[in-house]
Image: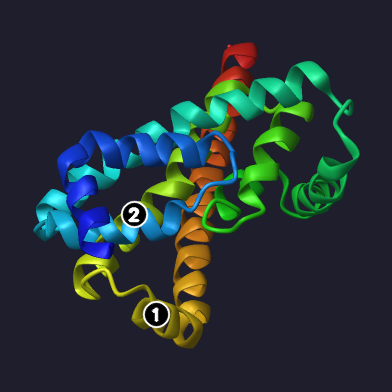
């Protein structure tokens, strides 16, 4: 049964993997993790190939995530009751981390709700796209890599994940924090330079 399932995934190839990520990004309840790990086993890509495959996966996910983003933007708070509990958790997460929650939440289940919250909060589209891509790319790379490493053995992966997930999340958060700090520093320098030039122009 499992062998037939893997053969079916192999027949679909990389387009099938991208479609899996598209469904995952659309916020539909979907076992994307298991399928992505299976694809890592089937494709057995090299490190360089994983870089490009993860790029395609992240693009598909980001593209699909625009659907819940626009749904949230159009419908606002008019969601079914079963959705509201998850949306409340997403809203609390968003209020705590601001727009960076779009990036930080992607490896977690709450990331699906953040897409709606980002739309409801009127996050600028280009920022939403960039932050979503930044958040999902490391996850895409690591999942394909682990799928290849563990040979599609989900139980072995789960044991590894439970043991070392804290360190993995720590690395991702530190990386995002560094990117945010560099971006903030550059923006601050630009504002200072602009102010100096403006003051210099007024004096002359």
Question: Which mark is nearer the camera, 2 or 1?
Answer: 1
> Where is residue 79 shown, x and y percent of the image?
85, 30
96 relative position to 174: left or right: right
Location of the N terminus by quadrant is: bottom left
Q: Give the mark nearer the N terminus: 2 vs 1.
A: 2
Residue on which the image places disc 2:
36
For the question of whether residue 103 can be seen, the reply is yes
Judged from this view, the residue extending furthest toward the front is 1
Colour scheme of the rendered structure: rainbow
Q: Does residue 178 lie above or below 150 as drawn?
A: above
- Secondary structure under tag 1 reads helix
Report if the CB atoms under discs 2 and 1 are less than 8 Å apart: no
- Closer to the camera, 1 or 121? 1
Looking at the rendered image, the quarter that the C terminus falls into is top right
- x%, y% of residue 161? 45, 78
* As drawn, 84 above or below 96: above
* 55, 146: nearer the viewer: 146
Q: Nearer the viewer, residue 100 or 27?
A: 27
Residue 185, image x and y in percent?
53, 47
Q: Secondary structure at mark 2?
A: helix
Residue beneath disc 1? 155
Q: Residues within 10 Å of mark 1 (few under 14, many from 20)?
A: few
Query: Can residue 138 be seen in the rendering of this structure?
Result: no
Residue 115's x, y, as percent? 65, 36
Residue 100's disc is none
- Residue sitting at 58 percent across and 28 percent down? 196
């Amino acid at each position: 049964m499992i062998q037939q399932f893997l053969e079916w995934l192999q027949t679909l190839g990389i387009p099938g993997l991208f479609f899996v990520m598209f469904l995952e990004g659309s916020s539909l309840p979907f076992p994307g993790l298991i399928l992505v790990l299976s694809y890592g086993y089937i494709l057995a890509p090299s490190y360089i190939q994983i870089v490009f495959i993860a790029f395609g996966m992240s693009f598909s996910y980001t593209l699909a995530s625009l659907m819940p983003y626009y749904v949230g933007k159009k419908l606002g708070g008019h969601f079914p009751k079963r959705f509201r509990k998850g949306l409340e958790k997403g809203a609390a997460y968003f209020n705590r981390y601001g727009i960076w929650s779009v990036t930080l939440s992607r490896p977690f289940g709450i990331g699906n709700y953040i897409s709606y919250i980002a739309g409801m909060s009127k996050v600028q589209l280009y920022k939403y796209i960039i932050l979503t891509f930044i958040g999902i790319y490391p996850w895409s790379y690591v999942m394909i890599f682990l799928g290849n490493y563990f040979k599609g053995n989900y139980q072995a992966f789960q044991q590894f994940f439970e043991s070392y997930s804290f360190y993995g999340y720590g690395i991702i958060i530190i990386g995002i924090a560094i990117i945010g700090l560099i971006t903030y520093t550059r923006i601050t320098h630009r504002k200072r330079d602009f102010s100096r030039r403006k003051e210099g122009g007024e004096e002359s």
